[in-house]
């Protein structure tokens, strides 16, 4: 299965890079509000360039048999693409197209201080549990699947 998927990587990555370029071009032309932050802070251009570089690095790492590095590049690409959207939307959470003054922003959507404090406590208690469960599941199911007489 890994060998079959390895053959798909190159054409799919080329398609991903082309779609990324087309999406970026369409965004630049039709969604002016997403580009404003990049005009205000030109150094933000490093984020889409970095995303393109880590996306282009994925097939290179797979070609050299370094799947973990390809996974790290894929994770970095996801993080950079999320950062790219965040930079474009900030401070909006949901942009109102007919009337930008009606957009949902981080300021008019924020909860009260008490609610945020309660959520902080829940997060401080819950996150270690989630991380411990994730680590345990990862440890139990580590390694590649091997087909042998006990497999089904």
Image: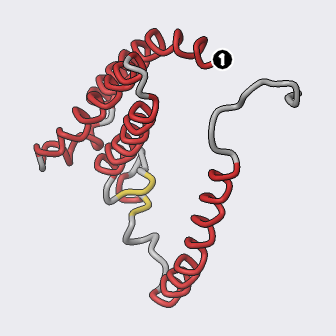
Q: Secondary structure at mark 1?
A: loop
Residue drawn at the location 42% of the way across and 17% of the way down: 13
Residue drawn at the location 32% of the way across and 25% of the way down: 57
Q: Position of residue 112 (x, y in %)?
A: 48, 85
Viewport quadrant of the N terminus: top right
82 left or right of 122? left
Residue drawn at the location 52% of the way across and 9% of the way down: 7
Residue drawn at the location 87% of the way across and 25% of the way down: 149
In this view, 56 is above or below 110: above
Which of 80/61 is in front? 61
- Is residue 26 shown to the viewer in this render? no
The quarter of the displayed image where residue 110 is located: bottom left
The quarter of the displayed image where residue 34 is located: top left
Badge count: 1
**Residue carrying label 1:** 1
Q: Can you name the residue that lies furthest to the bottom here?
A: 114
Which of 83/58 is in front? 58
Which of 3/86 is in front? 3
Viewport quadrant of the C terminus: top right
In this view, 4 is above or below 27: above
58 left or right of 121? left
Q: Position of residue 27 (x, y in %)?
A: 33, 30
Q: Position of residue 35 (x, y in %)?
A: 23, 40
- Is residue 112 shown to the viewer in this render? yes
Q: Position of residue 59 (x, y in %)?
A: 39, 19
Circle 1 crowding by C-alpha within 10 Å: few under 14, some 14–19, many from 20: few
Q: How is the image coloured?
A: secondary structure
């Amino acid at each position: 299965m890994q060998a079959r998927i390895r053959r798909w990587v190159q054409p799919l990555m080329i398609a991903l890079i082309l779609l990324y370029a087309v999406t970026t071009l369409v965004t630049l032309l039709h969604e002016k509000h997403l580009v404003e932050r990049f005009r205000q802070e030109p150094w933000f251009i490093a984020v889409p360039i970095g995303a393109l570089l880590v996306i282009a690095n994925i097939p290179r790492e797979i070609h050299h048999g370094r799947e973990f590095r390809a996974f790290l590049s894929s994770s970095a690409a996801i993080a950079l693409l999320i950062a790219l959207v965040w930079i474009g939307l900030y401070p909006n959470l949901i942009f109102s197209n007919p009337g930008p003054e009606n957009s949902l922003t981080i300021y008019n959507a924020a909860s009260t201080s008490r609610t945020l404090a309660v959520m902080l406590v829940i997060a401080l208690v819950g996150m270690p549990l989630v991380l411990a469960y994730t680590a345990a599941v990862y440890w139990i199911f580590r390694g590649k699947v091997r087909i042998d007489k006990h497999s089904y």
